[in-house]
Image: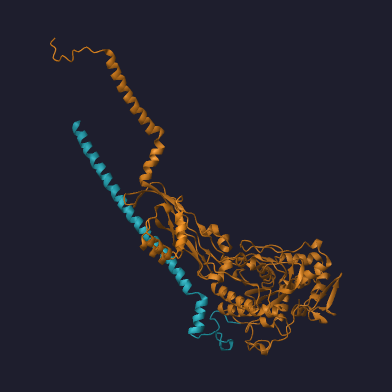
Amino acid sequence: MIRINLVLLCLLVICALALVTSQHRARKLFTELEKEQDIGKQIDVEWGQLQLEQSTWAMHSRVEHIARGTLRMRVPPSGRVRLVPAPARSVP
Amino acid sequence: MKRLNPALSLKLPIVRARVLLSLLLLGFAMLAGRALHLQVLQDDFLQRKGESRYARLLEMPAHRGMITDRHGEPLAISTPVESVWASPADVQATPAQRRQLAHVLNMSEAELNKRLSGSGREFVYLKRHLRPDVAARLVQLGIAGVSLRREHRRYYPAGEVTSHLLGFTDVDDRGQEGIELAYDDRLAGKPGSRRVIKDRLGRVVEDTESVLAPIEGRDVVLSIDRKLQYLAYRELKAAAAEHRAKAGAIVVLDVKSGEVLALANVPAYNPNNRSRRDAARARNRAITDLFEPGSTLKPFTIAAALEARLIRPESTVQTAPGYLMVGHARIDDVHPAEVLTVSELIQRSSNVGVAKLALALPRQQLWSVLSAAGFGAPPRSGFPGEVGGRLRDYQRWRPIEQATLSYGHGISVSLLQLARAYTVFAGDGALQSITLLKRDAPGAATRVVSPGTARAVRAMLETVVHPGGTAVRAQVLGYRVAGKTGTAHKLQGSAYAPDRYVSSFVGMAPASDPRLLVAVMIDEPDNGEHYGGVVAAPAFSAVMAEALRMLSIPPDAPATLAEPDETQPGGPLPEVREEV
């Protein structure tokens, strides 16, 4: 009787220690996960800022200004435009 | 029996034992009572106190969705910014640090001290929405009691070009105007929360309850084309500046799908700058302001007359002697003519001729065409603050009202409503439902007039831009254009102001199979000219020509203009006829 109790007691102690260890590991992993998620969020924010930056650089007024001013580009007069019929359907 | 200890044999009074026993019992009773008090009566309170040592409720902010144009180009983006706040009681800063802080925040030292002097408060915003580099410098100062808080701020990359359309959000990122307000539910999302356990170092180690996940704001995809929007705004602004106009608006519609491709107003404002904004500039005139359309309404009168079989396209109307008396009121033509065909009524914009047709029509007939074309009811674009304009009940019309209505007086419309009504002539007799959101399939259209009538009126509208018409300047090289000018006196109180006008032009191209519809309205041009054909038509032509090219819509006319002198910019202007 007393032997069984001792075995059970040992088992109980082992289980208790295992519980503590796994809990600790779970928390560690959870912290890790949190950290990664934070990085993910940070990257998301950066993506938004980059999108914003891109669309600010690509503002039509700016593009037009550079095209006309610096690069001296202009829309070709319609006399110099030749229409090429599309392969599928012909252009009226 | 031998006595070992004399003390044990001591005979004590029984009462001492009783007192001791009762004291012990009392002690136990007190312990039990205290235990009961803590475990049962104060349990909730203590549990909370204990939990607050390690458990935290974390807010999970939801991100506000983007607004993009039809090609996915961002028009409004939320991005996190730092706001700096302080707890005045906890601020420990040397005078030198205060000076530095004031310098970084770009505020005067006195103002900073004033904000920090409110000792009763625990939370004071020093400055909201800092730029990231400013926030970084602030962190370097490292002043105790001054902290940063992450908030979201809305940015509009296109600035004033899309200002009226998108509206804006308030400092807490809630929609206040325009699309931001109309689709706030969809954009805003819902913040979530989670209860967690934190360890000694402040790291989250465990979720204790089920996490209430935040619902992220969804993106709204508009029907707007950013390139066309910019183009429309640029040309409108140039036209308004050239004619020293008080205001102006422009709408570009895709005729086939009913989508609004561009919608702009002047004067505009920069939505990225919250401090300078006044209500007059913030109004989206194209949707929320009414004006009397003037002659742009004439095609609807003609269409009603054609539908009623009162006239045929080749019928003639006598407009001599250039005026018409209705009761005591007199209707005038700017350029008196003799006998005109129906087509010439439109081309020369004869008030007398159209009024004669309107008076010959049964009231209900005219009213039902106008009503079916969407006049008198909001255009249901989904924009907040949309107006429906005024179209009086035909049963209470007086003859003069019936006559003036035929050329667009005594009725009020918004520019968007007017543009939508013209889809009747662009799309073979059916009124398109319009939308500001991207559509994959054409919207529902309701029939207003027969396809034959719509085509006949469209052919008449084409003559408007031909030599002899009122809007030669609306021509687009290489395309057939159909459209109508409008010039109306502005109402001032209950009378028409003699020298204040609203000039407009509504047109479509290519006329053989219209794809685009552009409506331009210039409010109070003040440069000596006020006819729609001079003020609004050139802006129409510029926008239409560029838009057709951008959307690569094939030309349907030879690449020469009808008037040779119009091919050179700045050449002499052909005679312009217009009504008032």
Residue B352 pos. (x, y %): 81, 75
Residue A17 pos. (x, y %): 25, 43
Quadrant of res B360: bottom right
**Image quarter in which the N terminus of chain B is found:** top left
Q: Is residue A51 above or below residue B350?
A: above
Farthest-out residue, right: B327
Judge left or right: residue B121 versus residue B560: left
* Colour option used: by chain
Residue nearest the viewer, comparing B419 with B22 = B22
Q: Which chain is depicted cyan?
A: A
Residue under the image location 15 percent in, 14 percent down = B6
Residue nearest the viewer, comparing B328 with B302 = B328
Q: Is residue A70 above or below residue B267?
A: below
Quadrant of res B572: bottom right
Residue under the image location 73 percent in, 76 percent down = B456
Residue under the image location 55 percent in, 86 percent down = A76
Chain B representation colour: orange
Residue B423 pos. (x, y %): 67, 71
The answer, for residue B61, to whether it is visible in the render is: no
